[in-house]
Amino acid sequence: MNLTEDTDRKETHIEKKTDNSAVLMTFIKYAAYIIIFFGFIWFIVTYLLPMFN
């Protein structure tokens, strides 16, 4: 008697799903941080530094 023939085999397929919306939201968030940072630097260089010359 062969046990592998008597038992039902159950196959499971695991698919890794990536959440593209979370990746996109993170990219947009850090892109906004970078834009705000460079905007602040531009403001300092354009308006504040000439005041001290």
Image: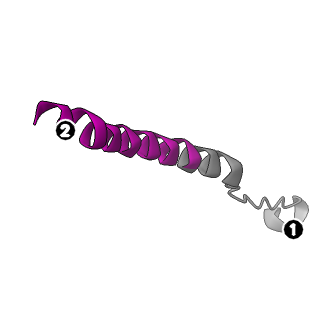
Range drawn in magenta: 28-53
Residue 34 colored in magenta in the image: yes
Q: Nearer the viewer, residue 5 or 15?
A: 15
Which quarter of the rendered picture does the N terminus lie within?
bottom right
Residue 22 colored in magenta in the image: no
The vertical placement of 34 against 13, above or below, is: above
Residue under numbered circle 1: 5
Circle nearer the N terminus (2, 1): 1
Q: Residue at x 84, y 58 (%)?
A: 10
Residue under numbered circle 2: 50
Number of numbered tags placed on the structure image: 2
Which quarter of the rendered picture does the C terminus lie within?
top left
Considering every residue shown, the one lying at the far left of the view is 53
- Name the amino acid type tagged 2: Pro
* In this rendering, position of residue 23 left or right of residue 11: left
Give the quadrant of residue 16. Answer: bottom right
